[in-house]
Amino acid sequence: MVDKLAKKGQVSGLKLVAFQLLLVLFAALISTVFFSNKAGYSALLGGITFLLPNLVFVLMTFAHAGARQSQKVLRGFYAGEAIKLFLTVLLFVVFLKYGTLSLIAFYISFSLLVASQWLAPFFFYNNDGIKHVRSR
């Protein structure tokens, strides 16, 4: 169960994951239309390689909040990051070893989501995800 204080952070994190899902679907669609079905499938798997571990991280990190639960917050963060890294490596190994992929589309899609993660603070200034303009 998610604490009320943690809910805002989790909602913002899930908005980012939803945005990244749209990016993956768009990249897969563009790859399929302009290149091939294999490129589209590869772009989708490259995005899933980043998106699924990131979703697990968001859910685990924002499960608790508040001063009294600082140990749970810290544990959730470290466990979420460890699982995220392990799951990312596992998905890379499985998809690259057993899939017949277009490596360029796979890596471009994965890299696109990494870049979207870095640029997230520019799109989500506050926990509610809305940019606020100050009036003077």
Image (cartoon, rainbow, N blue to C red):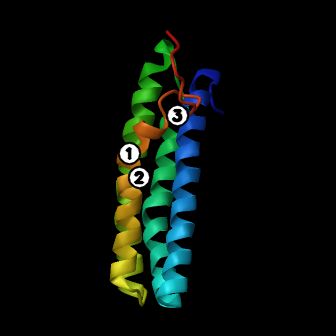
Amino acid type of disc 1? Leu
Which is nearer the N-term, disc 1 or disc 3? 3
Question: Circle 2 is placed at which residue position?
Answer: 116
Quarter of the view holding residue 94: bottom left
- Callout 2, which amino acid? Ser
Of circles 3 and 2, the one toward us is 2
Question: Disc 1 versus disc 2: distance between alpha carbons?
Answer: 5 Å
Q: Which residue is mark 3?
A: 62
Residue 70: x %, y % from top left: 43, 20
Question: Does residue 59 appear in the picture of this structure?
Answer: no
Q: Is residue 117 above or below residue 94?
A: above
> Is disc 2 surrounded by few (<14), some (14 to 19) or many (20+) residues within 10 Å?
some
Pointers 3 and 2 in contact (CB under 8 A)?
no
Q: Secondary structure at mark 2?
A: helix
- The correct choice, above or below, for 41 with respect to 6 in the image is below
- State whether residue 80 is above or below residue 25: above
Which quadrant does the N terminus fall into? Answer: top right
Disc 1 target residue: 119
- Marks 1 and 3: CB-CB under 8 Å? no
Nearest to the observer: residue 92 or residue 123: 123
At x 55%, y 68%, the residue is: 26
